[in-house]
Amino acid sequence: MAGHSKWAKVKRIKAVKDPRRSKVFSRLSRDITITARGGGGDPAMNPRLRTILMKARDANMPADNIERAIKKGTGELPGVVFEEALYEGYAPGGVAMIVKVTTDNKNRAASEVRSVFTRFGGHLAGAGAVAFQFVHSGQFLVGKDQAAEDSIMEAALEAGADDVITTADGYEVRCSVAFFDKVAQALEQRKIKPESAEIAYIPVNTVALTDLDAVRSFLKLHEAIEELEDVQQIFSNEEIDDALAAEA
């Protein structure tokens, strides 16, 4: 399991149980609002919004919730003004982490993230101390049932993607942030539906956790951060053997 395998994360989101569903909806709602504010509320004119709406529907988010989130972003409905922020830190074992939050109170968000890092043996770092270990890039995960490898490559590379990586789980398409919308449109035109599509921080190198105690500490820290209300995404560069992950 490397970097909390993005494929594994997608499976966890799709399998989320009712007690946690409201938290997933809350995060999706914030994402929709911010995306609609930046690119407009019409999915036909905002490819990034279309991608998020696809994710929301896959999570069975109610249509009313989606509509309200869009209208808050476009100013048609009053609502809290959310801002995005990134926090960088290190987990036990030297694992580098980037935590993306969407919050109405950056001071509160920073305090909560710092508290969790400290409680579980990690620490926050200054801006730029961790980010250089990641590539900021568009990332699409496409299941092998969606299309043949040649078709995926042709669509992605013609749209400006940098690379298509074939794995046992499927295809990972990477592109610069500037080409994210164009690649999303190219896949959509071929009726290729990604399992996941996001602007991600992809680790350049990984840190192998080979000690069970370190694995447990890292997983507890990761889970605790994931539970914070303002946290949208977590990016990390750990590599954990599947057997150790199961034991933890």
Image (cartoon, helix red, strand yellow):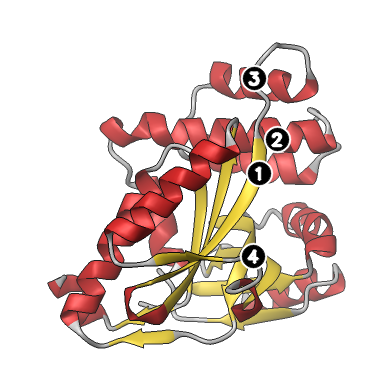
Disc number placed over residue 128 in the picture, else none = none
Mark nearest the camera among 2 and 1 is 1
- Residue 44 can be seen in this image: no
* Image quadrant where residue 163 sits: bottom right
Q: CA distance from mark 2 to mark 1?
A: 9 Å
Residue at screen point 80% across, 59% down:
186
The amino acid on which the numbered mark 2 sits, given as a three-letter code, is Ile
Q: Are marks 2 and 1 in contact (CB under 8 Å)?
A: yes
Residue at numbered disc 1: 84
* Label 3 environment density (alpha carbons within 10 Å; few <14, some 14–19, many ≥20): some
Task: Please indicate whether residue 44 sits to the left or right of residue 129 in the image.
Answer: right
Q: CA distance from mark 1 to mark 4?
A: 14 Å
Dot 2 or dot 1, earlier in sequence: 2
Mark nearest the camera among 2 and 3 is 2
- Residue 224 can be seen in this image: yes
Residue at screen point 29% across, 67% down:
121
Q: CA distance from mark 1 to mark 3?
A: 21 Å
Q: Secondary structure at mark 4?
A: loop
The amino acid on which the numbered mark 1 sits, given as a three-letter code, is Glu
* Label 4 environment density (alpha carbons within 10 Å; few <14, some 14–19, many ≥20): few
Decide which of 148, 210 is in the foreground and name it: 210
Q: Secondary structure at mark 3?
A: helix
The amino acid on which the numbered mark 3 sits, given as a three-letter code, is Glu
Residue at numbered disc 4: 127
Residue at screen point 50% across, 22% down:
62
* Image quadrant where residue 71 sits: top right
- In the picture, the quarter occupied by the N terminus is bottom left
Residue 202: percent from the left, percent from the top?
59, 73
Residue at numbered disc 3: 67
Residue at numbered disc 2: 34
Residue 26: percent from the left, percent from the top?
49, 30
